Each structure stands twice: as C-alpha cells, then as structure tokens.
Image: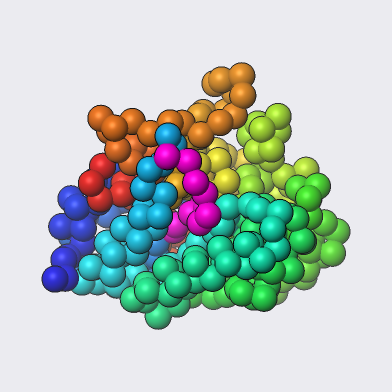
Amino acid sequence: MEIDRRDFMKLAGLGGIVFASGLGGRVLGAKRPKQEEFYFVQLSDTHIGFDGPKVNPDAKGTLKKAVATVNSLAQKPDFIVFTGDLTHTTDDVKERRSRMTQFQDIAGQLNVKTVHYMAGEHDASLDRGDAYQEFFGKLNYTFDHKGVHFIVLDNVSDPGAIVGEAQLRWLQSDLKRLKPDAPIVVLTHRPLFDLYPQWDWATVDAKGVIDSLMPYKNVTVFYGHIHQEHHYMTGHIAHHAAKSLMFPLPAPGSVPKRAPIQWDAAAPYKGIGYREIEADVKTARYGISELAIPGA
C-alpha cells in the first residue's frame, strides 16, 4: 500500500527539522515540488556485516526496514544517496566482497530510478577502495540534478584520512567551470573540519577543500561517519552529519572512549535513522527532515 509524504513522516517518526543554506522550510504533505524543487533521501553508515546484539539485535533488519519505508512513498524521491560505510570492515578479502554483495542485494530493492553510492573507511581504507570500486564505481565523481551541482569527495580510501593533492586538483578543476552563485552540494564521508580528531572525526587536509569552496556562495556539505545528527558552519558553508542505520555514537568528546551506544529495549532504534533533504534550487535552501526507523 502506498502512503503519501505526510503519512510517511508519521510512520517514520519525524525527529525534527533543521534547515541549511539560507534557512527555509516546507509544509509536510505539500503538493509535488515545483520544477525548481526536488527532494532526495540520504542514508548512511549501514555497516552490513556488523554483529553486536547488545548494540543492535536487529543488525540485519534496519536497512531492510528503511528500504521498505522509502519504497512505500507515493511520491518517490528524485534519488537516494548512501554516504559511506556501506559495509563493516573486515580483513578477510572474500568476506569483504560478500558483505558488499549483501549490501547490493538489499539496496537493489529500492524502487527509485537513481542511487548514488560513496565509500566509507570501513569499505575502502584497507585496500584503497579496490573492492569498493569493483562493486560501486568511482570513489569521487560529480553529477548535476535540476540545477544543483553535486560533488562526491573521497576522504576515506587513503588510510591517512586525506583527500590528497590529485583529488584536490580535480576538485578545483571542476569548480572552475561553475559560477560563483551556483548551488553546490558536497557529499562525503568524514567531516571536512576538525570535529574531534582524537576520534578520527576529521579530514587531515580538509583546509584545501574548504579554501577551494569558499569563493562559491551556495555550498552545503552532507556527510556521515559520526553516526549522529550534527550541524556546523565554516564561514558560510553549512555541514550536516547524518545518523547511522546501524548504531549511534556518543557526542564528540562526551566520553573517554568512542564506542557504539548500546541498544535500549525500552527505546529500540533510538539514535538510528536517515533523512529527507528537500532542495529549493531557486533560493539554494535545503530543508532537512530527520527520520527514525519505523517502530522506534
């Protein structure tokens, strides 16, 4: 049975709405977006292959639940984006490919025309993205959608957590063809600022990326990695972290050691989720709806 977007919000358990890049809003259940508007769904940190009953006894089910809910939408998102850590890390090369196949099988059930993937360090750092690229293609690339330029940046395949000079030159070359007021969305895994380097929540050479983006007036960054909602500004550039679909992590520096927050039977799926992002191209505004796993 199909549901409309208002019912989807109720089913998914709307956790709150924040707004980026110009601060704007929308009315839930509104009519189909105008030509200069669209929306997409961001899912992140699915960690297929993770096994930890005390952290997530439904480890094999959360992504499937998210896929089923997205598929039930009467108004389909324009596309889906996965912002890294599709699989959980393993030293076993054969098992790594098995987990990627499992992820493909589940994500392949999404009833949308286009799905964009990117790697996380769990997918790519042990072999510099070799297996990932066999399954999902390039580690960095661009695409355009209804007037917005999307840049997928790789800050995970190098185990040193860097973007690297070659990719920075590629980024700068890509940006040169854009107007200063072009709406730009950067999709990446690690944060492009020093959120908490002690926990690997940073990109070592992020400054070069930010400096390259600063001349452009309408830039927004969506990322994953930290398994929680977080919002930050570098100048006029807004950065927004997504929740994980496997387990939440504590706020940066809030505990001595970074470790998954354990499952709470009284509040199952707490801190786990995904989100809708609605783009108003004309004003370069992005309305972000944080969603929980159904049943939370």
What kind of secondary structure does the magenta stretch mostly adopt? Answer: loop
In the image, residue 71 lies in the stretch drawn in magenta: no
Q: Answer with left or right where residue 56 lies relative to residue 235.
A: left
Q: In the rendered image, is residue 140 in sight?
A: no
Residue at image position (35%, 55%) is 61
Q: Answer with left or right where residue 114 lies relative to residue 117.
A: left
State the residue lying farthest toward the right. Answer: 165
* Residue 197 x/y as whole percent: 70, 33
Give whichever of 255, 34 is nearer the camera. Answer: 255
Applied colour scheme: rainbow
Residue at image position (72%, 45%) is 203
In the image, residue 52 lies in the stretch drawn in magenta: yes
- Which region is colored magenta? 42-53
Up/down of 206 relative to 31, above or below: above
* Residue 78 x/y as whole percent: 38, 73
Q: Answer with left or right where residue 273 lies relative to residue 240.
A: left
* Residue 62 x/y as whole percent: 36, 53
| Quadrant containing the N terminus in the rendered view | bottom left
* Residue 283 x/y as whole percent: 42, 60
Up/down of 19 relative to 276, above or below: above
| Quadrant containing the C terminus in the rendered view | top left
Give whichever of 24, 145 is nearer the camera. Answer: 145
Give whichever of 110, 81 is nearer the camera. Answer: 110
